[in-house]
Image (cartoon, rainbow, N blue to C red):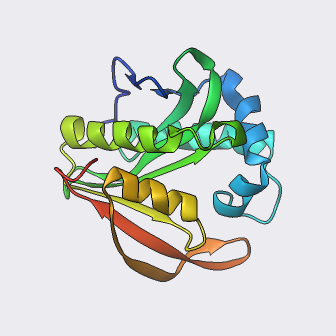
Amino acid sequence: MAELQYPMPPLADTVVLLRPWRTEDVPGKLMAFGDPLVQQFAWSRTTAYTEADARDYFVEQETARRAGHALTVAVADPRDEATILGGASLYDVDRETERAGIGYWLAPEARGRGAATHTVRLLAGWAFSALGMKRITLTCGPDNDASQRVAGRCGFVREGVLRSDVVFKGGRRDSVVFSLLPGELR
């Protein structure tokens, strides 16, 4: 499978700039993953998130990008691209079946400003237009009301609950699943 190229120019609007992660972003990512809300919804392990985890994550994501399976981006402030607002990814990309998943997280200071909604709209729009995707899924924990609101604002349709879907913090967690088809993006 062909590697995924970062969009050029980078996807951006007045709220977010989606750009490749950089080594110097590791401290910003570490601080955000220390946030209790990110830990509650985005970090599946019971151990603390470390700098080694962040560096390993970058290597894993670059390997997935080169294999054509994922594209992970830093969500930055468009006025200062060194300021990290969060992260996002298009993952489980399957060009044969024209499907992918989308995920995101935000640092505490970026919440409540529309950054997640703008990020999902930009990334999903690009996946439909540039990659020819025909279905994008978004999953989140049943108690993650903020992510469910983002899905709704972007036009995703709730399909149901995947019971005992993911290994999470030493147990299993359900996932609410949403889907978005071409022409539904709001």
Q: Nearer the viewer, residue 120 or 44?
A: 120
Q: Can residue 71 be seen in this view?
A: no
Residue at image position (68%, 41%) is: 107
**170 sits to left or right of 41:** right
Q: In this view, does 77 lie above or below 88?
A: above
Residue at image position (22%, 34%) is: 130
Residue at image position (38%, 53%) is: 153
**161 sits to left or right of 25:** left
**40 sits to left or right of 47:** left
Quadrant of the rendered image containing residue 112 = top right
Q: Is residue 24 above or below residue 150?
A: above
Residue at image position (56%, 58%) is: 146
Q: Which of 41 and 65 is in front in this view?
A: 41
x, y (%) of residue 117?
45, 44
Q: Can residue 66 be seen in this view?
A: yes
Count of numbered labels shown in the rendering: 0
**31 sits to left or right of 119:** right
x, y (%) of residue 168?
66, 71
Q: Nearer the viewer, residue 15 or 90?
A: 15
x, y (%) of residue 77?
57, 23
